[in-house]
Image (cartoon, rainbow, N blue to C red):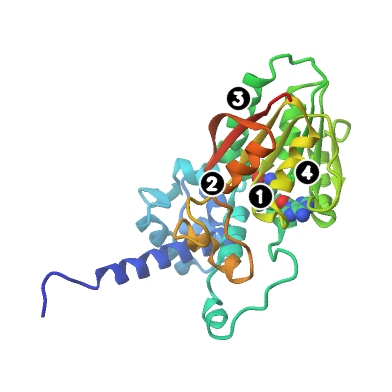
Amino acid sequence: MGTEITPNIYYQVLNQYQAAQLLFESIKLDIFSYLDKPTTAVEIANETGYDEQNVELLLLALLSCNYIGKENNSYCNTKIGAEYLSKKSPYYMGETILFRETMTSLYDIGNKVKYGSEKQAGIGYDFATLAEVTVPEMYATGRVDSFVSEIKTIFTDMNKKYKILDLGGGSGILAIEFAKNYLNSKAYVFEFPNVAVTTEKIISQHNMEDRVSILVGDFNTDEIGNSYDMVIASGILDFATGDLDSFISKISDALLDNGYLLLIGRYSDKEGYTQDNILGWLSGYMNGIKPPPTRNRVETALNKGRLQLVHSIQSGRFQGYLYKKAMV
Ligand SMILES: C[S@@+](CC[C@H](N)C(=O)[O-])C[C@H]1O[C@@H](n2cnc3c(N)ncnc32)[C@H](O)[C@@H]1O
């Protein structure tokens, strides 16, 4: 028997898988919402009607993964748990985590590998639900904060009538936050009709119906408007179906001279599918989603569209790039 190699990695994976299942099931049971103050298993069981002994075991398991803490006989949320997993927090992300798990789940890839997959007509992602669940994520992961500090450095006249477009804007949160900061501005969110229903709901939850409007359509084939001071293109380049040069030049044409394009997304350094984050995209790729365009390909299209890089910015977990449209 060789001594240098062990199968430990597989046992570690088993353990991580169990830790992940434990987290998802506990979110579904809404356990974290009972743990904002020190609480015993008996108290949770009394309040919920859940089985007392199994609640105690669940809490012990959560403790073993450091998802929660313990003082004497009582369990309580960690700071992170209180912020993101308790429904009493405005930053509750339980539904977001469960949705992302379902969206990227690999449960059926065995069958797809054996029998191939029916490439879905369209994109195959539930973008309406995605728009809804990304709202807390946008705030919690710092995407909104980095966006607001970026626009404040570009658009210094707080009273000017800026006009901006959030193309494939999903939740529309970036457009909403723009309009909240610039009181005379007008923001537009361009979305598919089925997603626009959700966007509209989010806009009205923020009471921004007067200054954030929705343009409904398909950005690959429909007009997207013009004379914008800024276009936000966040996570959408993968869904440009035609020629990338034409898509970027359509965005550029919609901008005023000296207008800005905020591009947020993933590009790959090599053509085709690569190892970068393939796990998160594997089910999507098997359903027919294209690999991201290469950085070179995007830069060529941007150059042709007279869009010059100002600087790169971090947008939460994503990389963003700010471009300015050069005058002719
Ligand atoms: C990955 S999501 C990004 C959403 C949002 N921009 C963000 O960063 O959170 C891509 C969005 O583009 C929209 N989208 C994709 N293809 C589209 C098309 N052809 N026309 C209009 N919207 C489209 C989807 O509905 C979805 O909301």
Q: CA distance from mark 4 to mark 1?
A: 23 Å
Residue 277's place in the image compared with 312, above or below, is: below
Q: Is residue 67 left or right of residue 254?
A: left
The answer to which of marks 4 and 1 sits earlier in the sequence is: 4
Q: Quadrant of residue 129?
A: bottom right
Residues at circles 2 and 1 in contact by the CB criterion of under 8 Å: no
The answer to which of marks 2 and 1 sits earlier in the sequence is: 1
| Residue 191 screen position, x and y as percent | 80, 49
Q: Nearer the viewer, residue 96 or 10?
A: 10
The answer to which of marks 2 and 4 sits earlier in the sequence is: 4
Q: Residues within 10 Å of mark 3 (few under 14, many from 20)?
A: few
Q: CA distance from mark 3 to mark 2?
A: 25 Å
Residue 239's place in the image compared with 205, above or below, is: below
| Residue 248 screen position, x and y as percent | 71, 43
Label 3: element kind: helix
Q: CA distance from mark 2 to mark 1?
A: 11 Å
Name the residue that disc number 2 marks. Answer: 295
Label 1: element kind: helix
Question: Which quadrant: the N terminus?
Answer: bottom left
Amino acid type, callout 4: Ile
Nearer the camera: disc 2 or disc 4: 2
Amino acid type, callout 1: Leu
